[in-house]
Image (tube, rainbow, N blue to C red):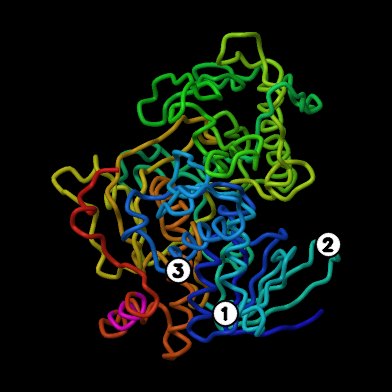
């Protein structure tokens, strides 16, 4: 077995890992990052989910490094794509003109920009990225994690990496389990947390948010790109959950906000329409480009119809987990096949859109599905401080006009408390929230001294995970964790000493704000806005 050492080991290469690496590297630390696929970037790339962002993301709602990423995506298109003059000279333009975000872009463009941002550090070997590597064991001593064994999924070779600080940026919180870090699965009970929308009775660890296997499509009218009938198609064609208003494979689904039935066709009925699925996560808008450059728009399918909730991924045997992943992918194929062959058309003429073409090249795979399943909920650390619904939820903060203000803030975020249907067979939980802060206490495990969460595995609940799990927030969580590890190395401190000592906390917050460009608070006009 090869043995390696670095200042900071980041296990997992997701969106939070990128923020973590950039902050640690900028502070002069050596970093090794592992990633189980061949694309780093998580939600932004290998899971193929265009950013879910806040309304102020281009002005004050994200860290400086996240804004460099956003600007880099737009610049990449300007440098490499045949844009129209209007698109080229529009500030903060949206490559896909999707209505879910101000920055709907192709996954591989996101990857290219991330690689550009990391390139100088990789060339100097201050950063080493181990692709196709997964954690398989952790060596601990008391309240410290000493080293992690990473295994190459292709060769089976193993490398033992030791580091004074280790960050868990895996999508499922895998390292928490391997290292015996106290953590929580699924849904806490109302009795535990006091949250209005938590489950009643006992906690339900196997009640976890739906996962989705995303894919990209374009549409070539008059052509036939129908895929082979998926193995599980007949099951999904007939399946209907008790809380769903129609068959899973239909244009019907409940609105997450009103829980009323929504009926949306795939195609728009006029330019600028925003109520159809095609516009929702469109990642390439052909009219942004010179005539003839692209035969079709490209849209990313991450729609309610592909939410999979029949089996959880966490707290179950490996064969159950693998069955869930297989069934989730089969559901995505089934939706595509249904749209190609049986879906009622928006023009009222017959059924099916055989011209829908699965774009495997856009997501970088041979099977046409994203490289990794979209995970909304992971293991979460038992933290020094846990963010609850009563800290951020509008309804439970009756009498207040903003979220709880955290004195130990290490960043900000804003999104509705948005929980998709769950493996407990519960429908959407969609709650208004205020723009919020990320408290440092939520990044510090209650016992372990040198392992930090760097994504959605921080100290939140099943409920508040619903607003802390989105792209800019995950990036900020990782960036704060990477900076905290580097700061502790420089100062000879433990993370909880930084939080619980006034002078160290203020010094660290100044570093975040002044050196790294991490906003710690919302301006007043945004703070009181209900999302």
Cα separation, mark 2 vs mark 1, equals 25 Å
Disc 3 marks which residue?
65
Residue in the picture at 36% in, 76% down: 512
Q: Position of residue 511 (x, y in %)?
A: 35, 80
Q: Earlier in the sequence, mark 1 or mark 3?
A: 1
The one nearer the camera, 65 or 94, is 94
- Give SS at disc 3: helix
Q: Considering only vertical position in the picture, is 77 above or below 262?
A: below
Residue 467 magenta-highlighted: no
Disc 2 marks which residue?
154
Report the magenta residues as a range.
Answer: 506-512
The quarter of the rendered structure image containing the N terminus is bottom right
Q: Are marks 2 and 1 in contact (CB under 8 Å)?
A: no
- Give SS at disc 2: loop
- Horizontally, residue 430 falls left or right of residue 137, namely left
Residue 510 magenta-highlighted: yes
Q: Earlier in the sequence, mark 2 or mark 1?
A: 1
Q: Position of residue 17 (x, y in %)?
A: 55, 66
Cα separation, mark 2 vs mark 3, equals 33 Å
- The 10 Å Cα crowd at callout 1, few under 14, some 14 to 19, many 20 or more, is many
Q: Considering only vertical position in the picture, is 233 above or below 295?
A: above
Disc 1 marks which residue?
8
The part of the image, by quadrant, that contains residue 212 is top right
């Amino acid at each position: 077995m090869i043995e390696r050492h670095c200042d900071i080991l980041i296990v997992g290469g997701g969106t939070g890992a990128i923020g973590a690496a950039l902050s640690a590297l900028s502070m002069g630390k050596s970093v090794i990052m592992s990633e189980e696929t061949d694309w780093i970037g998580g939600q932004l790339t290998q899971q193929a989910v265009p950013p879910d962002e806040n309304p102020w993301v281009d002005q004050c709602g994200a860290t400086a490094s996240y804004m460099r990423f956003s600007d880099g995506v737009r610049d990449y298109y300007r440098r490499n794509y045949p844009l129209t003059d209007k698109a080229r000279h529009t500030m903060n333009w949206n490559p896909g003109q999707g209505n879910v975000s101000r920055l709907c872009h192709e996954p591989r463009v996101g990857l290219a920009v991330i690689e550009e941002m990391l390139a100088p550090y990789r060339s100097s070997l201050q950063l080493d990225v181990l692709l196709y590597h997964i954690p398989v064991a952790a060596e601990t001593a008391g309240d410290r994690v000493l080293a992690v064994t990473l295994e190459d999924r292709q060769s089976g070779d193993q490398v033992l990496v030791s580091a004074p600080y280790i960050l868990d940026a895996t999508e499922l919180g895998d390292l928490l389990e391997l290292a015996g870090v106290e953590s929580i699965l699924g849904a806490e009970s109302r009795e535990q947390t006091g949250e209005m929308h938590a489950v009643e009775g006992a906690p339900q660890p196997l009640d976890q948010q739906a996962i989705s296997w995303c894919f990209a499509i374009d549409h070539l009218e008059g052509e036939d790109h129908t895929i082979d009938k998926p193995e599980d198609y007949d099951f999904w064609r007939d399946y209907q959950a008790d809380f769903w208003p129609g068959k899973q494979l239909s244009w019907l689904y409940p609105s997450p906000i009103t829980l009323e039935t929504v009926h949306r066709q795939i195609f728009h009925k006029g330019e600028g329409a925003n109520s159809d699925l095609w516009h929702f996560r469109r990642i390439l808008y052909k009219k942004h480009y010179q005539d003839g450059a692209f035969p079709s728009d490209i849209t990313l399918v991450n729609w309610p119809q592909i939410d999979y909730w029949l089996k959880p991924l966490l707290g179950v045997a490996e064969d159950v987990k693998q069955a869930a992943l297989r069934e989730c992918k089969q559901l995505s194929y089934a939706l595509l096949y249904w749209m190609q062959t049986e879906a009622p058309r928006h023009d009222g003429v017959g059924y099916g859109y055989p011209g829908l073409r699965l774009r495997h090249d856009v997501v970088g795979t041979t099977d046409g599905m994203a490289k990794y399943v979209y995970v909304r909920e992971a293991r979460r650390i038992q933290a020094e401080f846990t963010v609850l619904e009563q800290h951020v939820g509008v309804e439970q903060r009756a009498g207040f006009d903003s979220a709880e203000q955290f004195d130990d803030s290490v960043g900000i975020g804003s999104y509705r408390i948005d929980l998709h249907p769950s493996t407990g067979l519960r429908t959407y939980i969609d709650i208004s929230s205020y723009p919020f802060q990320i408290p440092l206490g939520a990044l510090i495990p209650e016992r372990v001294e040198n392992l930090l969460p760097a994504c959605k595995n921080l100290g939140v609940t099943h409920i508040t995970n619903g607003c802390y799990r989105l792209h800019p927030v995950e990036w900020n969580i990782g960036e704060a964790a990477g900076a905290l590890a580097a700061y502790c190395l420089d100062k000879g401190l433990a993370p909880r000493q930084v939080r619980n000592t006034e002078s160290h906390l203020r010094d660290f917050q100044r570093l975040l704000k002044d050196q790294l460009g991490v906003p710690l608070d919302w301006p007043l006009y945004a703070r009181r806005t209900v999302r």
